[in-house]
Image (tube, rainbow, N blue to C red):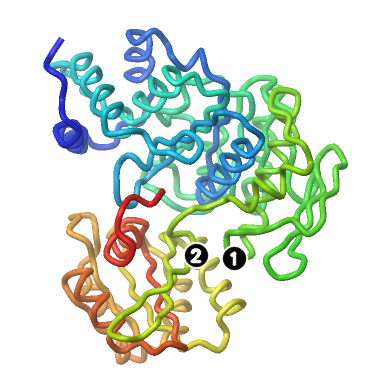
């Protein structure tokens, strides 16, 4: 057994796994889990796939199950500031000591194999090992990108949840919403209930066909359960078993979050025989939902001014549409200052131009990641009218400083385009892990 790693050595070892690029498939993960004693078989798992909304649904379920007294693990991605954000039990992140010990075990296990596991495969293994060691009551697993060939799809869950499906990662998942839905549908298991947000018409038939094929009972949003906005900051819910709940608290901003909250509650309702949550606990749990950088509003003091900064991880067409809708609905009278940066492989087309048109000023930037689009190239690609009120700078720190310097207390500074960018700005403004 090699010498135990420190936390920073473990971080470095995991970061080096990024040299092994995306490799869809389950064989490596299954083989390594078998050598680890198949920790996933000791867990009661909630499995979540989808293009947008996975994290919001997972965070909602985490809060609801935690409020009911269940020891609940949540594995999510990506992290915003600290890698430990991917692994949490109830309201705490994995400790640096546990992280280092588990990475030390993984490093010893993988050794110098010809076929090294990827970064995401390693984090998935770590999550399953930690949750099993900690004997969680429930383990919420969020897929990374797809579903069928995603490293998390080595489990047999108690329920499968599929959130909104739209175009993203087309080079890996397929060029159409229907093709992408086929990949997401891979998490549906025989005779295991499935909950689906069902807002993409092209995806509904695909998910329904998969559920019928493997005899998975399907609860479909809008058909079998529903959620609607009520008074500001609240929503009403009607569940697949007929349960009705009114004026529930909605802590995450945006109309799309009503759907996500409804999906979480429908899953919870179907899980009631295993994880009963009293009705009076539901409102308590929903009030505790936190999911950083998803329409997250920060109060910032800068050079004597009290400013508002909205952080959002919108990074694909559907996310950008949802952000633009939320800005129009919730901040109609604000002068908008937008900091934007996106990955080079993201093509958001007209929705991005619509979002940029809402802003009085746009600042394009990038993190150090080579995957980010060069801001000067983004600037050059804009129509002349948008280019005239758009500027760019090389670093996120410069972009933040310049936009905060020109912002006034009644303005709204919005950061979007990538969760990595939003997380970087959050670290600059708030510091510490996004717990």
Residue 4 coordinates in the image, percent (x, y): 16, 20
Residue shown at 63% from the left, 39% from the top: 67
In this view, the residue in front, 193 or 230, is 230
Q: What element does badge 1 sit on? A: loop
Which mark is drawn over residue 237? none
Q: Against 105, is 434 above or below?
A: below
Residue 250 coordinates in the image, percent (x, y): 65, 59
Which mark is drawn over residue 254? 1
The part of the image, by quadrant, that contains residue 17 is: top left
Q: Is residue 37 left or right of residue 318?
A: left
Q: Which residue carries the number 2 mark?
A: 295
Residue shown at 50% from the left, 46% from the top: 55
Residue 150 coordinates in the image, percent (x, y): 42, 31
Residue 371 coordinates in the image, percent (x, y): 23, 55
Q: What element does badge 2 sit on? A: loop
Instruction: Tell me which label, 2 or 1, sits earlier in the chain.
Output: 1
Residue extending farthest to the front is: 304
Q: Is residue 132 left or right of residue 196?
A: left
The part of the image, by quadrant, that contains residue 127 is: top left
Instruction: Give neighbour class at mark 1: few <14, some 14-19, many 20+ (Cα, 10 Å).
Output: many
Tags 2 and 1 in contact by the CB under 8 Å rule? yes
């Amino acid at each position: 057994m090699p010498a135990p790693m420190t936390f920073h050595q473990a971080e470095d070892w995991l970061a080096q796994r990024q040299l092994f690029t995306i490799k869809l498939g389950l064989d490596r993960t299954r083989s390594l889990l078998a050598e680890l004693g198949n920790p996933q078989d000791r867990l009661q798992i909630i499995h979540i796939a989808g293009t947008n909304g996975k994290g919001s649904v997972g965070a909602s379920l985490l809060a609801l199950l935690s409020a009911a007294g269940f020891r609940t693990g949540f594995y999510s991605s990506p992290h915003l500031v600290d890698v430990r954000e991917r692994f949490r039990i109830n309201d705490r992140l994995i400790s640096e000591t546990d992280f280092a010990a588990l990475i030390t075990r993984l490093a010893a296990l993988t050794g110098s194999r010809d076929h090294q596991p990827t970064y995401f495969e390693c984090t998935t293994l770590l999550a399953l090992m930690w949750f099993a060691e900690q004997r969680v009551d429930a383990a919420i697993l969020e897929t990374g990108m797809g579903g069928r060939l995603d490293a998390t799809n080595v489990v047999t869950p108690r329920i499968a949840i599929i959130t909104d499906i739209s175009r993203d990662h087309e080079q890996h998942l397929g060029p159409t919403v229907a093709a992408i839905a086929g990949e997401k549908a891979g998490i549906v298991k025989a005779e295991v209930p499935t909950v689906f947000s069902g807002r993409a018409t092209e995806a509904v038939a695909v998910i329904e066909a998969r559920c019928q094929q493997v005899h998975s009972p399907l609860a479909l949003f809008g058909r079998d359960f529903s959620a609607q906005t009520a008074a500001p900051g609240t929503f009403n819910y009607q569940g697949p078993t007929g349960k009705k709940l009114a004026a529930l608290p909605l802590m995450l901003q945006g109309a799309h979050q009503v759907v996500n909250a409804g999906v979480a509650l429908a899953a919870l309702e179907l899980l009631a025989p295993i994880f009963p949550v009293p009705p009076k606990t539901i409102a308590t749990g929903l009030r505790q939902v936190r999911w950083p950088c998803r329409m997250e509003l920060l109060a910032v003091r800068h050079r004597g001014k009290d400013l508002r900064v909205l952080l959002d991880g919108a990074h694909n067409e559907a996310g950008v549409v949802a952000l633009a809708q939320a800005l129009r609905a919730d901040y109609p009278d604000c002068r908008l200052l937008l900091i934007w940066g996106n990955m080079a492989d993201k093509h958001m087309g007209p929705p991005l131009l619509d979002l940029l048109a809402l802003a009085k000023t746009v600042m394009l930037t990038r993190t150090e990641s080579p995957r980010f689009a060069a801001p000067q190239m983004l600037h050059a690609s804009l129509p002349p009218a948008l280019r005239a009120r758009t500027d760019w700078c090389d670093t996120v720190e410069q972009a933040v400083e310049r936009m905060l310097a020109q912002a006034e207390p009644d303005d709204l500074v919005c950061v979007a385009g990538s969760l990595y960018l939003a997380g970087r700005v959050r670290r600059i403004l708030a510091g510490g892990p996004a717990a």
